[in-house]
Image (cartoon, helix red, strand yellow):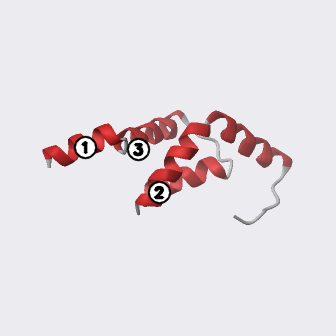
């Protein structure tokens, strides 16, 4: 990843998101590496680049992770 120069305020948001969404970043990175879902990629990008994450975005991120957990994926495969 290229080193970009961000303003102090932007860097503050990047650092905050990295702390607050540490587990989500790991999970979304794992999902994106095995999937070609544009929405999942955009949510990961929003967190990493320091965008303010709204409650609605946070809920969407949690749902992405939940839908792609092994437990729910196996259920979906068995049903389908």
Determine which of the numbered discs, if any, sits on residue 74 in the image.
1
Q: Secondary structure at mark 2?
A: helix
Answer with mark 2 or mark 3, whichever residue precedes in sequence.
2
* Secondary-structure class at tag 1: helix
User: What residue do we see at 51% from left, 37% from top?
Assistant: 58
Which residue extends farthest left? 79
Question: Pointer 1 and pointer 2: residues touching (CB < 8 Å)?
Answer: no
Question: In the rendered picture of this protein, how many numbered marks are placed on residues?
Answer: 3
Q: Image point 79% across, 42% down: which residue?
A: 12
Which residue of the protein is positioned furthest toward the right in this rendering? 8
Question: Residue 54: horizontal and vertical position, in percent?
Answer: 56, 37
- Where is residue 27 shown, x and y percent of the image? 50, 45
Task: Return the disc, 3 or 1, that comes first in the chain's sequence.
Answer: 3
The residue under label 3 is: 64
- The crowd level at tag 3 (other Cα within 10 Å; few <14, some 14-19, many 20+) is some
* Image-quadrant location for residue 5: bottom right
Q: CA separation, marks 3 and 1?
A: 15 Å
Q: Nearer the viewer, mark 3 or mark 1?
A: 1
Q: Tell me: 73 left or right of 21.
A: left
Q: CA distance from mark 1 to mark 2?
A: 18 Å
Q: Which residue bears the numbered disc 2?
A: 32
Q: Does residue 41 lie above or below 54 as drawn? A: below
Residue 63: give x, y in percent of width and height: 40, 39
**In which image quadrant can residue 1 be found?**
bottom right
Residue 13: % across, % down: 73, 42
């Amino acid at each position: 990843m290229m080193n970009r120069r961000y303003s102090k305020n932007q860097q503050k948001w990047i650092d905050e998101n990295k702390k607050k969404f540490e587990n989500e970043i790991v999970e979304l990175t794992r999902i994106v590496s095995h999937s070609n879902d544009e929405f999942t990629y955009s949510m990961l990008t929003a967190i990493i680049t320091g965008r303010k994450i709204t409650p609605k975005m946070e809920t969407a991120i949690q749902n992405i992770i939940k839908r792609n957990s092994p437990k729910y994926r196996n259920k979906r495969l068995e049903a389908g």
